[in-house]
Image (cartoon, rainbow, N blue to C red):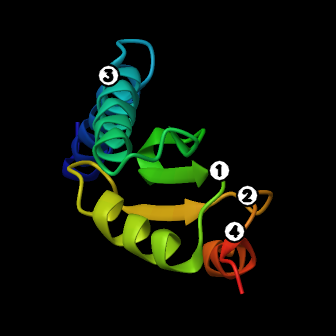
Amino acid sequence: MNRRLGLLLGALASVAVAELYHGPLGASDDLKARVERHARNLLDYYELPQVTARMDESPRARRLILKGPADDFQRRALVEKVGELPGVNEVRWDPSSPVVDYWAERRRSQPQ
């Protein structure tokens, strides 16, 4: 067996073991569950029960999707805080999530 063939077989074996580990053996499911649990704890700490966090369909991307009503300040702060969690590479908001303007609601509710 020549050197190139040995190197190619070694690379293929490494890729196969990595695919098995992340797929059928469940490491990606464990990562997904752990990250979503940490995100839920963070959202509960900041008293945002209406906001949900779920891992993207491809756990190897390590992208977390936030969904729920929040104002601009909360959106920016949550992207920063959730992005600091271990195992998270990127944080995005679901495009269908409403942007809430709490300041307009407060102004309307104050007596004039």
Name the N-terminal-most of marks 3 and 2.
Answer: 3
Name the mark nearer the viewer: 4 or 1: 4
CA–CA distance in space, label 4 to label 2: 9 Å
Residue shown at the point (47%, 62%) measured from the top left: 91
Name the N-terminal-most of marks 4 and 1.
Answer: 1
* 91, 13: nearer the viewer: 91
Asked whether the residues under the numbered discs 1 and 2 touch, taking CB atoms below 8 Å apart as contact, a structural biologist would say: yes
CA–CA distance in space, label 4 to label 1: 10 Å
Which residue, given by chain and number where applicable, does mark 2 sit on? 97
Depicted 3 relative to depicted 105: above or below:
above
Which percent across, then down, holds residue 112? 72, 87
Residue shown at the point (29%, 45%) measured from the top left: 42
Name the N-terminal-most of marks 1 and 2.
Answer: 1
Residue shown at the point (23%, 62%) measured from the top left: 84
Which residue, given by chain and number where applicable, does mark 1 sit on? 68
- Left or right: 52 as drawn, with respect to 21: right
* Mark 4 neighbour class, 10 Å CA radius: few under 14, some 14 to 19, many 20 or more: some
Name the mark nearer the viewer: 4 or 3: 4
CA–CA distance in space, label 4 to label 3: 33 Å
Depicted 22 relative to depicted 109: above or below:
above
- Left or right: 94 as drawn, with respect to 14: right
User: Could you say which disc has been placed on residue 100 in the image?
Assistant: 4
Which percent across, then down, holds residue 98? 75, 62
Name the mark nearer the viewer: 4 or 2: 4
Which percent across, then down, holds residue 44? 35, 39
Can you name the residue that lies furthest to the top here? 25
Q: Amino acid at mark 3?
A: Asp
CA–CA distance in space, label 3 to label 1: 24 Å
Which percent across, then down, holds residue 19? 40, 29
Q: Amino acid at mark 2?
A: Ser
